Image (cartoon, grey):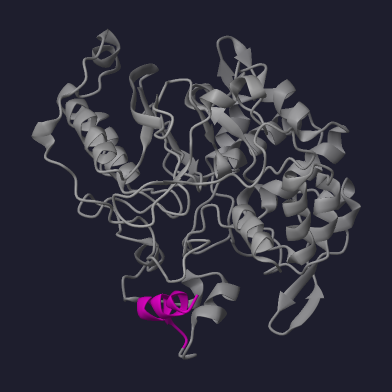
């Protein structure tokens, strides 16, 4: 493949991968998980923001919010990120909504509350929720074969060792929403080429993309394990086949219209491009350089990928989170049955350590959330009646700003330190979280990963000395070679 084609495949695939994140243009390995970032300037150089009565009404701890105001300003000043937009809800009240820094440094444009962000993998929960509106209407069952409407999936194959064998079970919508179908990220050169060409020149469709992916073998037998992959992209194709409508129309009619989310779509209309945040890379701590969009963001795509294609504002996504917290209803409009919303919080995996709901990660105790590769994150905790939203635009690196935000946001809500970091977003060291994706996977804390702590295909690749375990040193050595 050409370098551009590899780049397009990266954009398609490396969205929130839990084990490694590789800089697409880097010549050497740059580390796992969250970057250390640049040294923060002294806290006394900054002042807390003034806040209105909503802070007291929400019950958020004012002294912790003051620390959060200062901490976010320190991260912007250190150039760990260019700009931040973030929200904390508690007990049905938006207690804190602040922006910091710049949406576009070069143009001198400050971060505004209506700024538009690349949502990347935060698209996935949206697609799952849209699918569940059809489930509520009896249009499909969670455990029926997707081949009923997508014939290209009638005879899926599975790669087992060095051979390809027929799948023992059909792929179902539940599997697509919980990353248990056997699909990974990759999908073969034909699918990658199609995705790249569609970004350059609209024309390819979800049907054609799904047909290309279906020709490649699955990573494991459907329903037997977990691997983060293209399940939600294929779910988008399933929804189009089920309804006869384009995916963007399905989302507008079933979610964006009823929930009043006017700024969320698979492209940014020309009239709104001035609100789109510039995305930034970080070649070294404290240095921000403008990143690039492979596609023309203002061109409406024909290939709407449900895994990472949406743009939107934090205010729009706030309304989606409110609907989830309200068990399917917002402002008198019901989009999902309460018991259907309950389903997304349940664990749908048959996996010894991983818990995943429908479209997002869960902890089994009331939390549901996910993040995007370009720095967006959300967590809804219905057991505590809270949710947090955090949006930055970072390309090919993970700033330490989100762990700092989440630790203080939880403290402000009176919650313990984060115990359910989003995939690829470790907890803040010293604040109760594990320090990186390796440690998150190392469930028995023995300093090595066994087969039941990694997807099989990844384990076989990483176990360099074939001793039946993967060490952090082996992982480091592998990616230093890239």
Q: Residue furthest right?
A: 151
User: In this picture, is 200 found above or below 411?
Assistant: below
Residue 202 placed where, x, y %?
80, 41
Residue 372 placed where, x, y %?
51, 44
Residue 331 placed where, x, y %?
55, 10
Is residue 253 magenta-colored?
Answer: no
Residue 337 placed where, x, y %?
64, 25
> Could you say which is closer to the camera, residue 184 or residue 22?
22
Is residue 478 magenta-colored?
Answer: yes
> Which residue is drawn at the image coordinates 35% and 54% (left, top)?
426
> Which residue is drawn at the image coordinates 67% and 43% (left, top)?
295
> Which residue is drawn at the image coordinates 30% and 17% (left, top)?
58
Q: Is residue 135 left or right of residue 292?
A: right
The answer to whether one can see residue 86 in this image is: yes
> Could you say which is closer to the camera, residue 136 or residue 241?
241
> Could you say which is closer to the camera, residue 199 or residue 343?
199
Q: Quadrant of the N terminus?
A: bottom right
User: In this picture, is 104 found above or below 192?
Assistant: above
Quadrant in the picture for residue 446: bottom left
The answer to whether one can see residue 174 in this image is: no
Q: Main secondary structure of the magenta part?
A: helix
Q: Which residues are magenta?
A: 468-482
> Could you say which is closer to the camera, residue 423 or residue 146?
423
> Which residue is drawn at the image coordinates 66% and 24% (left, top)?
270
Q: Is residue 321 left or right of residue 168?
A: left
């Amino acid at each position: 493949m050409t370098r551009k084609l590899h780049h397009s495949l990266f954009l398609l695939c490396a969205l929130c991968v839990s084990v490694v994140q590789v800089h697409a243009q880097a010549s050497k390995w740059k580390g796992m998980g969250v970057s250390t970032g640049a040294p923060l300037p002294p806290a006394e150089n900054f002042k807390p923001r003034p806040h209105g009565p909503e802070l007291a009404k929400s019950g958020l701890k004012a002294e912790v919010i003051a620390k959060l105001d200062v901490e976010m300003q320190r991260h912007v000043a250190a150039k760990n990120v260019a700009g931040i937009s973030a929200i904390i809800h508690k007990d049905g009240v938006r207690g804190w909504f602040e922006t910091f820094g710049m949406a576009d440094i070069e143009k001198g444009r400050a971060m505004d509350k209506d700024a538009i962000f690349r949502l990347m993998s935060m698209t996935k929960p949206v697609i799952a929720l849209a699918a569940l509106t059809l489930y509520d209407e009896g249009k499909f069952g969670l455990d029926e074969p997707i081949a009923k409407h997508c014939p290209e999936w009638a005879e899926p194959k599975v790669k087992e060792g060095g051979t390809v064998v027929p799948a023992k079970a059909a792929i179902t919508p539940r599997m697509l929403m919980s990353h248990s179908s056997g699909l990974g990220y990759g999908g073969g050169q034909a699918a990658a080429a199609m995705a790249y060409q569609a970004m350059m020149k609209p024309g390819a469709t979800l049907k054609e993309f799904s047909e290309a992916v279906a020709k490649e073998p699955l990573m494991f037998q459907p329903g037997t394990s977990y691997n983060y992959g293209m399940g939600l992209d294929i779910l988008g194709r399933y929804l189009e086949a089920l309804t006869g409508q384009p995916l963007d129309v399905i989302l507008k009619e079933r979610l964006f219209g009823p929930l009043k989310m006017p700024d969320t779509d698979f492209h940014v209309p020309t009239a709104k491009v001035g609100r789109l945040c510039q995305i930034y890379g970080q070649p070294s701590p404290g240095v921000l350089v403008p990143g690039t969009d492979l596609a023309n963001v203002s061109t409406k795509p024909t290939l709407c990928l449900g895994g990472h294609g949406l743009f939107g504002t934090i205010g729009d996504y706030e309304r989606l989170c409110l609907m989830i917290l309200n068990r399917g209803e917002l402002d008198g409009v019901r989009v999902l049955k309460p018991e259907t919303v309950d389903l997304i919080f349940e664990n749908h995996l048959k996996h010894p350590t991983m818990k995943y709901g429908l479209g997002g990660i869960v902890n089994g105790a009331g939390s549901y959330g996910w993040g995007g590769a370009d720095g967006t994150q959300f967590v809804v905790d219905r057991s505590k009646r809270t949710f947090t939203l955090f949006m930055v635009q970072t390309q090919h690196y993970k700033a330490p700003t989100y762990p700092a935000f989440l630790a203080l946001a939880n403290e402000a809500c009176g919650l313990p330190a984060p115990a359910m970091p989003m995939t690829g977003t470790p907890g803040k060291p010293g604040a109760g979280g594990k320090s990186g994706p390796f440690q998150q996977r190392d469930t028995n804390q023995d300093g090595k990963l066994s087969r039941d702590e990694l997807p099989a295909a990844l384990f076989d690749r990483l176990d360099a000395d074939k001793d039946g375990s993967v060490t952090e040193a082996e992982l480091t050595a592998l990616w230093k070679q890239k």
